[in-house]
Amino acid sequence: MERPGPSEVAGSDASGPDPQLAVTMGFTGFGKKARTFDLEAMFEQTRRTAVERSRKTLAREKEEEMNREKELRRQNEDTEPTSSGSHVVRDCSKSSSSDTSSNGSEESSDSSDDELIGPPLPPQMAEESVKHMEENISRLPPPLYEEEEDDDDDGDSEDDENPVQKIPDSHEITLKHGTKTVSALGLDPSGARLVTGGYDYDVKFWDFAGMDASFKAFRSLQPCECHQIKSLQYSNTGDMILVVSGSSQAKVIDRDGFEVMECIKGDQYIVDMANTKGHTAMLHTGSWHPKIKGEFMTCSNDATVRTWEVENPKKQKSVFKPRTMQGKKVIPTTCTYSRDGNLIAAACQNGSIQIWDRNLTVHPKFHYKQAHDPGTDTSCVTFSYDGNVLASRGGDDTLKLWDIRQFNKPLFSASGLPTMFPMTDCCFSPDDKLIVTGTSVQRGCGSGKLVFFERRTFQRVYEIDITDASVVRCLWHPKLNQIMVGTGNGLAKVYYDPNKSQRGAKLCVVKTQRKAKQAETLTQDYIITPHALPMFREPRQRSTRKQLEKDRLDPLKSHKPEPPVAGPGRGGRVGTHGGTLSSYIVKNIALDKTDDSNPREAILRHAKAAEDNPYWVSPAYSKTQPKTMFAQVESDDEETKNEPEWKKRKI
């Protein structure tokens, strides 16, 4: 192929792109100039468009306001006297004149903006014009009911300043779990189901939408046999429940109570607990990861905190080993995840609080060695919803608040909160402005309380008397805005407010109690013989309900029994205490239940009468009965006189 000359190239440029080149390259568009954009002109056009729209909006609102004023003026003229009507019109005219003056000034400014002509502005002036345009757009007339909105805002601000008003405690319902302590509470993320566990080994399921006013659990089971339930928690998806008991193996069950997995038990003869596959001692508590599905952690008396995955129950995922400042092992009593799941916090028996990075198991990120008194079991640590504050409930009857950004001393501390249970917990309110915990009491020495502290000042702002037993568990659900409380006498209480709360207990209190249905059982044993001849085949048995319906139609079977006769007998029936001999015997003899304390005295009471006037036994043996002879008892002096001489010498 020959190379084209310059004249040919120039000719091809003038006529258009070469079709051969387009076919070879696979696309067209050669020879076209790139499109250029003038940003300053685009900004100016945008400003003008916005100004035009704002002018139209202002004109429309002005017209609507004038129409409203006319209607108001007409109504006042019809209803009120002329003087008051003229006063209203005067006020309206003043407001309208002020509005028109302001609008006129705006229009003049807008018109002055519209009169800008000439070459495009430099970049700095263009930016200033854009800012001026935004100010014009945001300059809108004030609302008609500004004062009322201000009042509402003031009310809202007062409610915000006083978080006690948001506590839902106007109504309550009581769920009867059992007779022993309710040591665990769990509520699914949607707030539809509540699960309770206690010292009686039972786990009970409560469905708010399915319950009626009887408040009965729809399922009860013992997932860990003879071990007390210490912690129950729904996963972040609500389809699984973590069950932590007094055994060394945690369990995961589904929403209906069927087992999903059970953690493996470790080898208790291995010294280094990091080399075992599971816990070797009693568990204390557990918690789900807030973000990762299927991950949870547990802490135990074997001085470890272990993380697990539901898909791998045969071995833990990682092991955290709390240590004292001297490097000795220490038992963690409670543990929890942070709100974002990146930190793991544990409180130990020596009074320390240790926080690890979830991905670094060797050294804790934060370690405060004297958070609570040594030797007391810290029962709960929990993070606030913003993730910056940690609350700890100590066994030394205190509640402390910590800032994890400056984890060198507590922010606040409250004392005088007695606790006698190793799972007494605390929680934050949904708006992070209050902290709630429970108090314990001895039996018959007062009532347990639910105490509220303000987070900003840590003042004791509110209390609720729960019952005459200790308050062990408390849970404030953020979606329902309802407070669940577990007590030491086997009750689970739900506090709610019809106006501030959602769903939950409000669904079941409005339902009437259902009538108990009679069990549909067979009336008698029925032998099924399908191959028997018709003459020997027994008729098919009906259920109890159908049989009762059939008996109801029978006048003899459905006859009401006659009540017992009161007073003397009548109509052939004998009264219970009538004048007949039988009623007299029944009343005075047969019902005589005198109880003699000494049966020997009761028999010997009739001995003299039987001897003087024998009637039953003695006459029958009068001829053959031998004469009764009793041995005479001699005194000690007479016995010594009659003794031989050799005995007297010995004495």
Image (cartoon, rainbow, N blue to C red):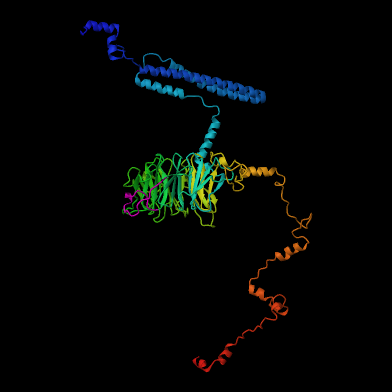
Comparing 437 with 100, the one in front is: 437
Percent position (x, y) of residue 366?
35, 47
Tell me if I can see residue 407 in this picture. no
Start and end of the magenta stretch?
A: 261-281
Percent position (x, y) of residue 176?
55, 49
Comparing 494 with 260, the one in front is: 260
* Residue 75 picture quarter: top right
Residue at the image point whose x is 33% and y is 15% from the top:
36
Q: Residue furthest left?
A: 2
Percent position (x, y) of residue 504?
53, 41
* Residue 595 picture quarter: bottom right
Q: Main secondary structure of the magenta part?
A: loop
Quadrant where the N terminus sits is top left
Tell me if I can see residue 569 in this picture. yes
Comparing 338 with 598, the one in front is: 598
Q: How many marks?
A: 0
Asked if the stretch drawn in magenta spans residue 135, the answer is no
Comparing 553 with 107, the one in front is: 553
User: Quick check: 503 left or right of 343?
Assistant: right
- The correct choice, above or below, for 136 with respect to 541 in the image is above
